[in-house]
DNA sequence: GGGGGCTATGGGGGG
DNA sequence: CATAGCCCCC
């Protein structure tokens, strides 16, 4: 099999080992996706039926990528392989099996916002103080409970957890948890955790011996990013693989050093337990990195060596040294963004990089704004991933609420939202009564509307009847009419369209465009999914002869809930990527900027108390720097706006973990030295706040940084741009003396071509506005 | 019932 | 700073 020649000996050994449990420990850039895809290709060529192969990933993107790559190697039989995210694969199974555990097949998936909103309502109904019972904190506690298979009953029996809650003065969390489960159930809704938890329950209860069906079905199971699985995910895998007579064909790929999801219950114990659970396990370590140049790899190893517990592994590269890492020290977050943007422009000119080769990474999504401002200033195309997605906009959520109701009218969150906007003559008081009747009878609010126990005015009753008729009509048509036609009808009949249209402000027009964009998306979704040859986001089905053909409204709603906006990146668009470090996992770029390396931010203030938290932040930093193939730039600001006020922060402790020989410190005035008086005084002129914050400058922890690569000129003074014309002899702080050969470009971004005397490059292109040249 | 303006509050990463 | 939630007025 010729494709096996493309693997190194260790990769090949892992790939051809097709029977029994296999663990591949794969460092960043070590060809892990290649190993996974070739392993599946190898299985197919060894005549394993594609329907018996399952590959689970964490993102839609990696699932899609994997399928495409397998198809390239073995052709269309790859389409019958089940490859998808844990959540989408399990949701698909649950669509078939939900009724066995009392859920409707058309169950709704609640996203984080829905969940938070349900919890808010419950907390309010219980007359608890929402400032004490913070809904999102409760959400994560419930989520962690589910992820560890702790039911409300087990929660009550758990002395530790109950004690924690009492100490935190939140003794009713478990009651909220219980009510939340009941509320979801009667709403026919599953949250993200339920997609796992309910599947686990299904297999555990095992009605009609359903688990056997899936054990037969998935004889070869693959898991990518195994370090990010939680206890519950592992428990489901065990249900599928660990049984009497099992071939135990489970192939997992992971890297403990890249485990960055402990906050959502991921546990490194899964890798350690895996070795215990499968004594026949064969382990392969991929340590050669094919992605990054030397200094980047060296820095990555240095950083990760500070973590306490890890599987022994040292990544290495035989790639040449090339650029050192650039470290940029800034006074403010604004300066940081400006210099990152400027440097991007410079790199684009000097190295002819397209935008698509460049990514700016940050710890928190809130940091994106400054970078956006400065990239826009330089007319550079960018795209922000994460943060508020399209489907979180109010008008979009309003429309989606009506669509959800048409599919599942029991869905209480959708019902509340729909009744709220546009208003339907059903008042808050009526809603409260509905909710309490529903709670008492354990029925949905939709059903409670018909309850004789409901004590409301005739007017309210009439309004509810009208609403039920409207939604009931849509529900009836959902099975016969095309998704697009129905959605268009719902947009009109709900009154949303007219209401949005009456708002002629620019924002109002934007909102109307957004809801129309939803209709377009539905139309496209329906088209794509009626075409069997097209590979959809999760093109798997129980009947493997047919590819996914489900273009229904229900299928659309499921897809958008499980999709993140990083998934709809269009190929061929040339833009700079802005995203959180978490979102960047698994991706690579020629040039990467890792920003905001400050105490309290990266590492996050939330992590500082607990060494485990710090280790995870460090792994996150490790993930960040190993995204870079050739150019890595790390930046930090000494002062940053946070919640409306400036706060001074020390440089991140992670910076001193990198050996100084691997980076150059790049100051605002050429290469200066961090923390030195000269550097600071040079900086002060750059900020109106310089004087008042200069007390924070010196940082003893990183005084051991590199001296500048080239000694700065003693009396250097930058000349105004107007004096920098072709023919002039100039001095540059880093490159020394040279002659301007040519000047071109618009005033804002004027670029000079300069021949420097002592320079290995024949000539350099330099953006004048920030290059700081002095005419001699 | 709807909308505008003010105040208090939160504050991380994501399927 | 952004926004949710509240109060108040129409």
Image (cartoon, coloured by chain):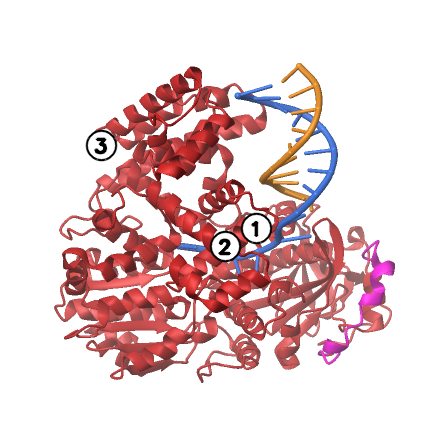
Chain colours: A red, B blue, C orange
Q: The residue marked by circle 2 belongs to what chain?
A: A
Residue mark closest to the camera, 2 vs 3:
2
Quarter in which the N terminus of chain A is drawn: bottom left
Chain of the residue that carries numbered disc 3 in the rendered image:
A
Above or below: residue A479 compared with residue A120: above
Q: Name the residue under label 1.
A: A134
Judging by the rendered image, the residue that carries numbered circle 2 is: A173
Q: Earlier in the sequence, mark 2 or mark 3?
A: 2
Residue A178, magenta (yes or no): no
Asked whether A688 falls inside the magenta stretch, the response is yes
Q: Which residue is rendered at x = 22% and y = 41% of the image?
A: A531
Task: Please say if A421 is above or below A591.
Answer: above
- The magenta span reads A686-706
Q: Is the residue marked by circle 2 packed among few (<14), some (14-19), or many (20+) residues within 10 Å? A: many
Chain of the residue where label 1 is placed in the rendered structure: A
Reading the image, the residue beneath label 3 is A479
Instruction: Give the Cα distance between marks 2 and 3.
Output: 40 Å
Query: Is label 3 in a helix, a strand or a loop?
Result: loop
What is the x, y in percent for residue A682? 83, 65
**Where is A155 relative to A468, above or below?**
below
């Amino acid at each position: 099999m010729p494709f096996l020649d493309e693997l190194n000996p260790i990769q090949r050994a892992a790939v051809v080992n097709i029977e029994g449990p296999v663990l591949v420990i794969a460092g960043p850039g070590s060809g892990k996706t290649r190993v996974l895809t070739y392993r599946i290709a190898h299985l197919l060529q060894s005549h394993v039926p594609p329907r018996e192969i399952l590959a689970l990933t964490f993102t839609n993107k990696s699932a899609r990528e994997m399928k495409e790559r397998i198809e390239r190697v073995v052709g269309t039989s790859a389409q019958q392989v089940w490859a998808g995210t844990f959540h989408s694969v399990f949701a698909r199974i649950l669509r078939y099996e939900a009724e066995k555990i009392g859920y409707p097949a058309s169950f709704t998936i609640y996203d984080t916002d829905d969940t938070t909103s349900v919890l808010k309502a419950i907390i309010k109904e219980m007359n608890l103080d929402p400032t004490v019972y913070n809904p999102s904190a409760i959400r994560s506690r419930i989520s962690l409970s589910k992820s560890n298979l702790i039911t409300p009953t087990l929660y009550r029996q758990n002395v530790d957890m109950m004690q924690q809650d009492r100490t935190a003065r939140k003794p009713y969390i478990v009651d909220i948890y219980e009510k939340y489960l009941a509320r979801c159930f009667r709403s026919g809704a599953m949250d993200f955790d339920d997609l796992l938890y309910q599947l686990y329950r299904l297999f555990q209860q095992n009605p009609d011996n359903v688990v056997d069906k899936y054990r037969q079905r998935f004889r070869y199971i693959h898991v990518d990013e195994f370090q990010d699985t939680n206890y519950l995910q592992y428990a489901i895998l065990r249900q599928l693989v660990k049984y009497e007579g099992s071939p135990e064909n489970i192939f997992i790929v992971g890297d403990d050093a890249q485990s960055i999801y402990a906050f959502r219950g991921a546990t490194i114990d899964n890798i350690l337990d895996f070795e215990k659970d499968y004594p026949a396990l064969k382990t392969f370590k991929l340590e050669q990195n094919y992605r990054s140049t030397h200094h980047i790899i060296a820095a990555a190893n240095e950083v990760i060596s500070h973590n306490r517990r890890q599987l022994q592994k040292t990544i290495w590269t035989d790639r040449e040294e090339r650029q050192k890492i650039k470290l940029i020290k800034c006074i403010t977050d604004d300066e940081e963004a400006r210099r990152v943007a400027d440097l991007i422009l410079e790199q684009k000119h000097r190295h002819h990089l397209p935008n698509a080769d460049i990514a700016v990474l940050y710890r928190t999504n809130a940091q994106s704004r400054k970078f956006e401002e400065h990239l826009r200033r330089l007319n550079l195309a960018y795209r922000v991933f994460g943060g508020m997605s399209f489907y979180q906009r109010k008008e979009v959520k309003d429309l989606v609420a009506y669509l959800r109701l048409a599919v599942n009218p029991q869905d209480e969150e959708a019902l509340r939202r729909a009744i709220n906007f546009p208003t339907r003559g059903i008042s808050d008081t009526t809603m409260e009564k509905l909710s309490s009747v529903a709670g008492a009878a354990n029925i949905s609010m939709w059903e409670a509307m018909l309850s004789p126990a409901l004590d409301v005015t005739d007017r309210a009753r009439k309004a509810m009847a009208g609403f039920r008729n409207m939604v009931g009509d849509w529900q009836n048509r959902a099975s016969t009419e095309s998704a697009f036609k129905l959605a268009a009808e719902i947009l009109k009949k709900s009154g949303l369209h007219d209401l949005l249209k009456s708002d002629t402000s620019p924002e109002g027009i934007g909102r109307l465009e957004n809801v129309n964009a939803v209709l377009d998306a539905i139309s496209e979704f329906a088209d794509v999914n009626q075409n069997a040859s097209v590979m959809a986001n999760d093109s798997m089905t129980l009947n493997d002869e047919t590819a996914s053909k489900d273009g229904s409204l229900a299928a659309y709603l499921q897809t958008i809930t499980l999709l993140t906006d990083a998934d709809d990146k269009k190929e061929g668009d040339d833009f700079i990527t802005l995203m959180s470090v978490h979102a960047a996992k698994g991706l690579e770029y020629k040039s990467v900027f890792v920003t905001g390396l400050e105490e309290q931010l990266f590492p996050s203030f939330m992590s500082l108390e607990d060494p485990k938290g710090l280790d995870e932040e460090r792994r996150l930093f490790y993930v960040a720097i190993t995204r870079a193939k050739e150019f890595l730039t790390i930046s930090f600001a000494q002062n940053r706006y946070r919640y409306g006020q400036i706060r001074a922060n020390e440089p991140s402790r992670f910076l001193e973990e990198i050996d100084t020989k691997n980076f150059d410190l790049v100051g605002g005035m050429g290469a200066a030295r961090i923390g030195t008086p000269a550097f600071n005084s040079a900086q002060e002129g750059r900020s109106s706040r310089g004087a008042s914050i200069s007390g924070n400058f010196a940082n003893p922890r990183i005084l051991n940084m590199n001296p500048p690569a080239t000694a700065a000129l003693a009396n250097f003074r930058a000349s105004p741009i107007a004096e920098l014309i072709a023919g002039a002899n100039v001095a540059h702080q880093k490159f020394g003396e040279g002659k301007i050969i040519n000047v071109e470009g618009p005033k804002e971004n004027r670029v000079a071509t300069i021949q420097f005397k002592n320079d290995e490059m024949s000539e350099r292109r330099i953006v004048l506005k920030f290059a700081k040249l002095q005419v001699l």
